[in-house]
Amino acid sequence: MYKYDQYDQAMVDTRVAEFRDQVNRRLEGHITEDQFKPLRLQNGLYLQLHAYMLRVAVPYGTLSSAQMHMLADIADKYDRGYGHFTTRQNIQYNWIRLEDAPDILADLATVEMHAIQTSGNCIRNISSDQYAGAAADEVIDPRPYAELLRQWSSFHPEFLALPRKFKIAVIASDTDRAAMKLHDIGIRMVRNDAGEIGTQFYVGGGMGRTPMIAPLIRDFVPLDQFVTYSEACLRVYNRHGRRDNKYKARIKILVHELGAEEYKRQVEEEFAHLQGQGIEPPLAELERIKACFQDPAFEAGAPDEVDASDPDFVLWTDRNCHPHKQPGYISATISLKPVGGIPGDASADQMRLMADLAKEYSFDECRVTHAQNIVLPHVRKADLYTLWRKLDEAGLGTPNLDRIGDIIACPGLDYCSLANARSIPVAQKISERFAAQEKQDALGELKLKISGCINACGHHHAGHIGILGVDRKGVENYQLLLGGCEGEDTSLGKITGPGFDEDGIVDAVEKAADVYLREKQEGERFLDTYRRIGIDPFKEALYG
Amino acid sequence: MKILTGNNLKTGAVVWWDGQSWSIHVEDAVDVGDRADDIISAEEAARRVVGAYAIDGEKDAQGVRPAHIKDRIRALGPTVRPDLTLKPADPEAGNWVI
């Protein structure tokens, strides 16, 4: 994992002191709320439905055991004993007191954490593949490059007041596990025909009220120029992005209005201009970062077999584990989606357990996924059964990764002041409706995502089944979408028709699932069947 | 009736204007008529509240009930965590929201 150097630590410590002063000045009346609001947002502190909400950055979703322990301690000491892992691989606390916020940031700083880049019109926390550095299918470990981008983008003076927020994902495999094409910039590390590693740039994707899939802008940028190319992409956006209309200010609108070719032409022009201006960091700095991401001390010749005598364990292994590049190891996903639970929530005790298990079984490391689960990236297969037993005893052994119960849901109207409808109760009811193992087995991979408003924090556009909560004259109503996908074959879901009430949407999901079960052919997932037969059979079942 | 709500500046707690001060209980809310802007200006200037706004409410036998579900959730707490609401021991409390 990355280790702060003296500059990183000094920046974070200085920021804590600065924010402490700002909070004191606000409480003493020296600055108004209008003056204070952008300052607190730059430190991840929102005013939400019930209280202040603090969003803590988890760069590319990576946490050490000590960091996870600190997140648990903060939940107990300053909040109400739990936290909510988000679709940007961060964590949020819902019950924060303003007067405590500086102390929380100071506690975070002791474990090299902060809340920078979690709000405002800046480059936000960089996201990545939750299996980075462990996956068997990646061409290179993307984390050093994500870290390089984090350092480049943190407090970048040119990009602190962008037209709108800006989200970047970095991956390094053909399989997209980070919704890369639905980011402002999606960077995929690739190997070209000459065997050289470089980066593809997809620019102008996003969800929200105007969902768009990012077009490919450049199919190969050499690794020693990719920060410069990122800077060129940002510069064109910063220059021409619309500041007159918040709803048209994201880069996806600029790329769409200019056209991908014209946007690319301007980026290439800017890129040529920037060449030789020293944008790229010194090679020594990249090497220093890379040294932090060396493989852990894997055991050579570790047994590659997994004990298959317990059927429940076998089920969990099949569902929740992912192949590792190192023989004898595997990446294990801890589902934060128990039947009827709140997607992404974890109690302080659960966080402590996950931290301890990460220390004992995964080289002191865990990952937050954009699907609101936790991954232990480097587990020895010989330890897997013991690990599973401990998880299962704590209610963390749900075998439902990428199944219908593995629902992404935003906090919705239960917590969010922007929401129009509640997301969590709908997720809970669907989870309970499909709790039976045979139902989940029959449905196979089925990604269901729920947002409580058009801002799409629950990624409803990208769900095989998506649900969007709206406000219809003061009453919650839910629209159903079908056919979305966040993977390498990204697609956007289509609305089926009129919405449903809270119970009606659960029935609607079941009807859509029944159409799939009726129509599916050998080997087809829900998404495959939908793409083959189209939306009409589903509409017929839903609306008759 | 028009009632006022906001958040306590220091703690962030949801509060309701009771005619003299801010209460965490919506039952204490009073009709402010056309005085909303004046009260909000004075109270925000005094740093007792932040993000204050006026909403429609109704008064019935059980007390004051905000007209919109968002403010009813603010008044009680998250519907998915009854243990964190102001009425954790009342199994029927959630019905008041919906």
Image (tube, helix red, strand yellow):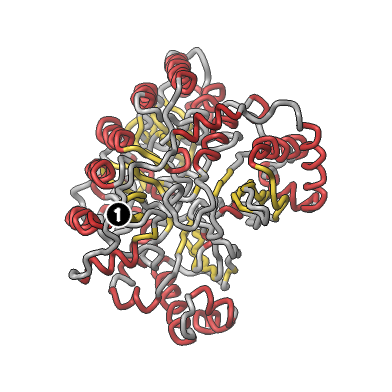
What residue is rendered at 30% in x and 61% in y? A304
Q: Residue at x 46, y 33 (%)?
A: A291
Q: In the image, is B84 to the left or to the right of A130?
A: left
Quadrant in the rendering for residue A120: top right
**Percent position of residue A176, x then y:** 53, 57
The answer to whether residue A295 of the structure is visible from this angle is yes
A164 lies above or below A17: below
* Location of residue A53 (image quadrant): top left
Which quadrant would the N terminus of chain A be assigned to in this image?
Answer: top left
Badge 1 density bin: few <14, some 14–19, many ≥20, Cα 10 Å: few
Residue placed at 37% from the left, 22% from the top?
A106
Instruction: Please say if A324 is above or below A153.
Output: below
Q: Nearer the viewer, residue A513 or A200?
A: A200
Looking at the picture, tell me which residue is in the foreground, A518 or B48.
Answer: A518
Percent coordinates x, y for residue A401 in the rendering? 37, 62
Q: Amino acid at mark 1?
A: Gly
Q: Is residue A227 left or right of residue A263?
A: left
| Residue A68 vs residue B97, the one in the foreground | A68
Residue that protrudes farthest toward the front in the picture: A301
Question: Would you place residue A137 above or below residue A34 in this image?
Answer: below
Taking A164 as reference, is A488 above or below it? below
A186 left or right, relative to A7 = right
Image coordinates for residue A453, horizontal then vertical, percent: 52, 54
Helix, strand or loop at label 1? It is loop
Q: Residue at x 61, y 49 (%)?
A: A186
Viewer-side residue, B30 vs A258:
A258
Circle 1 sits on which residue? A301
Position in image of residue A241 (x %, y %): 74, 40
Chain of the residue under label 1: A
